[in-house]
Each structure stands twice: as structure tokens, then as C-alpha cells.
Image (cartoon, rainbow, N blue to C red):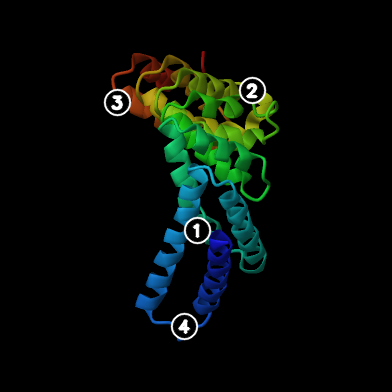
Amino acid sequence: MRLRNEVRQLREQVTALKTARTDSGAQEPAAALDQAQSRADAIRQLGVAASTGDLTALDKLAELSDVAHAQFKTNHDASVFAELRPAFDVLGAEAGKGSDTALQALWKGMRMDSVQGFAIQALGAAAGHGNEKALEPLLEPERYLILRSSAVGALKPAADSGNVRAIQALAAVAVDPDAKPLWFLAAEGLRKAASSGNVAAIDALAVLMRSDNDNVRREAIAGLETAAFNQSARAREALQNPGGR
């Protein structure tokens, strides 16, 4: 009952704040900030509740996500989705510490259309902190029935932490011609690993450097340059031989 009341209040606050944004004289700045902080704290508490086993909190977050989607259709303001992130930051952090309860909540969230994207990103954060169970659906998105694009984007924290399986998965995307729309995400995800001297990451960026997409090519070159600055002879050679001959 308490969570239901909180969600009702949050929905009312969200609506009120969006209305206030379109009415410059409706609210003093300090009052608007207080209201936003109160809402952020309440949303974060839903994440805390879910991480300790109250899975109904996920249903409440799904309701808020539905509200955000409805608002986005009207005002095209993507910031409405960012308001839910604190709850999933909590879940990702707790799962990263090894909490099976938080991981279970994220697993359930991965199966809920309204919050699936948030849950997948939080699984990526948990994997970045060393939770290998959280990494599994990101490595096999087809098996777990999630979008490959969502999984690839969520692999970055684990790759940044030096997780070999995450780096190999991103490197595989980089050399897959059918994954061309995901090449930028792969380049972005491999950048830190390459800067640390990881051979698989450097070789994958060397391949992506030859892409005909300017954004992909720039991201790959930036990663290789950082690796070269960090004394990687392999990265330096790739930059000197961009054609791969």
C-alpha cells in the first residue's frame, strides 16, 4: 500500500513538474529543485526496495516508465527517462556487490518491456563490478531474448574493467559485417581496454579504423591513439598502416 501511494504521488509530481516547465511563472526555482530532489529520492527508494526483495517495486517503476513514455510521445523530451535511472543505479551497484536478490530483480526487469532497457544497462554495470552472472545475457542476447544492440551497449563497463569475455564479445562484433550498425558501440566499448594494451581490443579497433563510417573510424582512431600514447607498439603500427597491408 505504501509503495502504491508513493507511485501515485510520484506520477502526480511528474505531471506537475512537466506542467511547470511550460509555465515560466508557475513555480519558484527553489521549489522546483526541492520537488525534483524529493522525486529522485523516492524513485531511488524503489530501487532500494527492489534490491532487498520487494519485486512489486519493479512494477511501480514500470508504471512510472509507462508515464515517461506517454510524456515522451507528447514532448519528445528524453530527460523523462533519466528520472528512473537512480533506481536502477542502486540495483546495478548492489548486484555488482554480489547481491543475488538485486540480480534477481534485474533479471525480472529484463523481462519487462517498460524497464528492460534500464535493467540491461544495470546488468552491464553489475558485470563491470565483477558479477559474472550478470554478464551472461549480455554475451548471449539471442538466447536470453534481448536485443543484441542493447547487450553490446551494456558490455562497456565489463570491458572497461578488463573482463576478457566482454572484450572478446565486442571484438567479435567489430569483425562481423552483419553487425555494422553496432560498430560504433563496439569501438566505444573497446577503447579503454585498448588503452590498457589489450591485444584483442587493439586489433579490433584496427579493423574498425577502416570503416566507411566517419564516427566509427574516429572512435577507433581515438582508442588506438590513446593506446599508442601508452606505449603500445601494436597500436602505433596500426595507426601507421591504416590500410592493414
Q: Nearer the viewer, mark 3 or mark 4?
A: 4
Check whether the beta carbons of the residues at disc 2 and disc 3 lie within 8 A of each other: no
| Quarter location, residue 90 | top left
Q: Nearer the viewer, mark 2 or mark 1?
A: 1
Is 114 in front, or is 213? Answer: 114
Identify the residue under disc 4: 24
Q: Disc 1 marks which amino acid?
A: Glu
Say what secondary structure mark 2 lies in.
Answer: loop
Q: CA distance from mark 2 to mark 3?
A: 28 Å
In this picture, residue 58 sits left or right of residue 48: right
Identify the residue under disc 2: 176
Q: Disc 3 marks which amino acid?
A: Phe
Q: CA distance from mark 3 to mark 4?
A: 50 Å
The residue drawn where x is 38% and y is 77% is 31
Check whether the beta carbons of the residues at disc 3 and disc 4 lie within 8 A of each other: no
Q: Considering only order in the chain, which callout, 3 or 1, is on the residue closer to the N terminus?
A: 1
Is 50 in front, or is 65? Answer: 50
Vertical order, 244 against 114 (above or below): above
The residue drawn where x is 43% and y is 15% is 199
Q: Can the viewer see residue 86 in this picture?
A: yes
| Quarter location, residue 40 | bottom left
Q: Disc 4 marks which amino acid?
A: Ser
Check whether the beta carbons of the residues at disc 1 and disc 3 lie within 8 A of each other: no
Vertical order, 103 against 82 (above or below): above
Q: Considering only order in the chain, which callout, 3 or 2, is on the residue closer to the N terminus?
A: 2
Circle 1 Cα neighbour tier, 10 Å, few/some/many (<14 / 14–19 / ≥20): some
Identify the residue under disc 1: 83
Instruction: Determine which of the numbered discs, if any, sits on residue 101 in the image.
Output: none
Q: Can the viewer see residue 212 in this picture?
A: no
Q: CA distance from mark 1 to mark 4?
A: 21 Å
Instruction: Determine which of the numbered discs, if any, sits on residue 229 in the image.
Output: 3
Q: Nearer the viewer, mark 1 or mark 3?
A: 1
